[in-house]
Amino acid sequence: MLKMKEVLKRVFSVSILVSVLFLSGCDLRSTKYIDTPYQGSISPYPDDNSTNSSVRQTLTWDFNSLSRSGSVTYDVYLGKDNDPPLVSNNQSEIYFQPQDMLDYETNYYWKIMVHGSGNEAVESPVWSFKTETLKNIRPLLTYDTPGNACDLYVDRGIAYVADDRAGLQIMDLTLSCDEAIVGNYNPGGSGVSSLTVSWDYLFLWWESSGVDSGFIEVLDISDPINPILIDTVDFVGYVENLFAYNQYLFASDFNTTYIYDFSDINNIVELPNNLPVSRGNFIQELIGNVMYIGDFYGCTAYDITNFPNIQFIEDYPFGYEMHNYSFAYGYIYGSCYY
């Protein structure tokens, strides 16, 4: 019979062997995980299993306490499945805002992977949240503008209104109706009919008086109520709609859609594109990697996976002269003249 001391020695030897094999297995992986265990100090927002989250949700987290050295980058995974797909990689920010509005009353799952120096990485748990219920829409307040409000963009509680008589009106929606207008931008004394916002930039379309042409202005709105002019792009034609996607600006007139690269905001460059000439193009929606362009005849879907190389997918013709489009719950809605 083995003595107790000998038994303990053999058990200890087996434990060392198992530990060595386990560590060797980890080293064979393409990603080496940091050996600091997850301590639950990430502080994700929205909270795990939260409900009634906004459909314009921004994901945030604090992962710095789990990094040992140097700068870190993050991969973000988000989707409707508990194994969510990658939506952003190698970003330095500790937040992520989806390009598109999320669906109402839907469960979403998300996680992050933090990468440090030396091929170190650690993965968070998968968190989940459920978006808010679609509410009955009714007017709460009415804000008046000096002229006709032709376009509108709301960002961080500030409304930017394209006024066809008084230029850009800036409203603080946290204030009462009679105090809401907190800024105005109208250096040319004319009207604005279209606008869009991307990052800290506001793009405005100004029509030259009496001619079918004008220019697009780029404003810095890092101070939301005090826009600063950065650049001006001349445009021959009449812009029906402006739309921004990442560092690209789409300007649509009655004939076609023009694409501009504003990655260098001080040197905006027009890009060649293979979008067809049509009648009255209106960029309407971007869902995932599919861009929908509506015109007077119907709506067309394009694959922009390899953007700016745009691939035709399918036409959705309508029987009337269309005026506008909207997209929700997997359906295309169109308003028309008849």
Image (tube, rainbow, N blue to C red):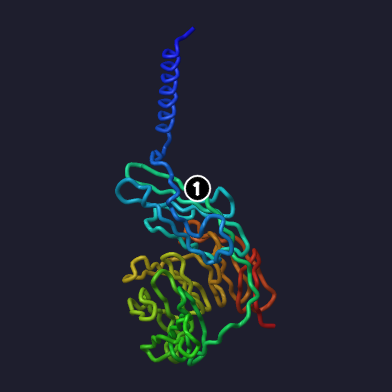
Measured from the top left, where is residue 138 in percent x and y? 63, 80
Res. 303 image quadrant: bottom right
Q: Which amino acid does label 1 sit on?
A: Pro
Image height check: is 119 above or below 195?
above
Q: Residue lying furthest left in this view?
A: 70
Determine which residue is flagged by label 1: 125
Image height check: is 10 above or below 162?
above
**Residue nearer the viewer, 84 or 137:** 137
**Residue nearer the viewer, 220 or 141:** 141
Res. 198 image quadrant: bottom left
Q: Residues within 10 Å of mark 1 (few under 14, many from 20)?
A: some
**Residue nearer the viewer, 303 or 115:** 115
Q: Is mark 1 on a helix, strand or loop?
A: loop
Image height check: is 135 above or below 88?
below
**Residue nearer the viewer, 127 or 302:** 127
Measured from the top left, where is residue 276 in percent x and y? 53, 68
Q: Residue at x 33, y 76 (%)?
A: 230
